[in-house]
Image: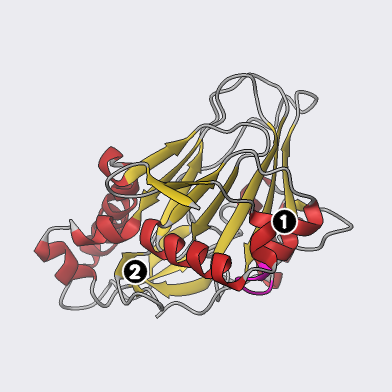
Amino acid sequence: MRIEQLTYSIGAELTNVNLADAIHDDALFAEIRAALLAHRVLFLRDQEITRADHVAFARRFGELEDHPVAGSDPEHPGLVRIYKSPDQPNDRYENAWHTDATWRVAPPFGCVLRCVETPPVGGDTMWANMVLAYENLPAHVKEQIADLRARHSIEASFGAAMPIEKRLALKAQFPDAEHPVVRTHPETGEKVLFVNAFATHFTNYHTPERVRFGQDANPGAGQLLAYLLSQAYIPEYQVRWRWKKNSMAIWDNRSTQHYAVMDYPPCHRKMERAGIIGDVPF
């Protein structure tokens, strides 16, 4: 296996390897996992593997989770189908910069994504290194956010376009989760800036140390959250991947954000993702 770094800050492409081999080859899998920790997102081309192999490889990292809104393959639980179609002209919304499913108490460890069908042009995905984003924050901002916590909501994201009854039922099934704004990576010990598009507000901002008068609370907290969210937008922290059929990406969900670029005309874009159950951020 060869590892080619794609940018200085994040991402590497693996060549001379078939992920199906890593299902049974412990040494190869260990090498891939080490590369994932080092580069945060790994890319591969020409992976003509079955859905069963896709799921089996992802399960080497841990048990898989289903998604309550996106559809899963009925024969392979845990393999979420992210399908866009020209027959759904109103389904043009894709996403914002986010870390998958931080609305869960225990967000995913990571994901393994495979391209089944790609647009003729466009439809790339971008990833950002949120360890580097934290490291480069001004010292006074690091001090300000050291003990902050934030709420993350599926109701305010996936639920926003639903009728109110369905939206409230979704929230009842998945109440808002609360996570530290700065989490510690459980394997590397790195500090990670851990707010994204699912974060709605800080839960412990309004204290005498931060707020002089009540009028300070909402604008001060909102402006700080917007500033932190904007750190993923910095190109120096990013890598961009052009999909082809049977291309794959493996990413560490604990230390990255990603963004699926919606720059293609109404056409088919079919992706299949296996998300690995993670731990509670601390």
Mark 2–mark 1 distance (CA, rounded to whole Å): 32 Å
For numbered disc 1, what is the local secondary structure? helix
Q: Residues within 10 Å of mark 2 (few under 14, many from 20)?
A: many
Q: Quadrant of the C terminus?
A: bottom left
Q: Residue sitting at 34 percent across and 48 percent down?
A: 232
The vertical placement of 119 against 158, above or below, is above
Q: Residue sitting at 55 percent across and 24 percent down?
A: 122
The number of callouts visible is 2
The vertical placement of 29 against 189, above or below, is above
Query: Mark on residue 248?
Result: none
98 or 209, which is in the foreground? 98
In the rendered image, residue 40, in percent from the top left (x then y), is placed at: 41, 57
170 or 235, which is in the foreground? 235
80 or 208, which is in the foreground? 80
Q: Residue sitting at 32 percent across and 42 percent down?
A: 7
Name which quarter of the figure residue 76 lies in.
Answer: bottom right
Q: Which residue is mark 2?
A: 181
Give the mark nearest the N terminus, 2 or 1.
1
The answer to whether residue 192 is magenta is no
Please report the bounds of the magenta region as a residue range: 59-63
In the rendered image, residue 247, in percent from the top left (x then y), is placed at: 61, 40
Left or right of 128 on screen, residue 52: right
134 or 251, which is in the foreground? 251
Q: Which residue is mark 1?
A: 54
Q: Amino acid at mark 2?
A: Val
In the rendered image, residue 63, in percent from the top left (x then y), is placed at: 68, 74
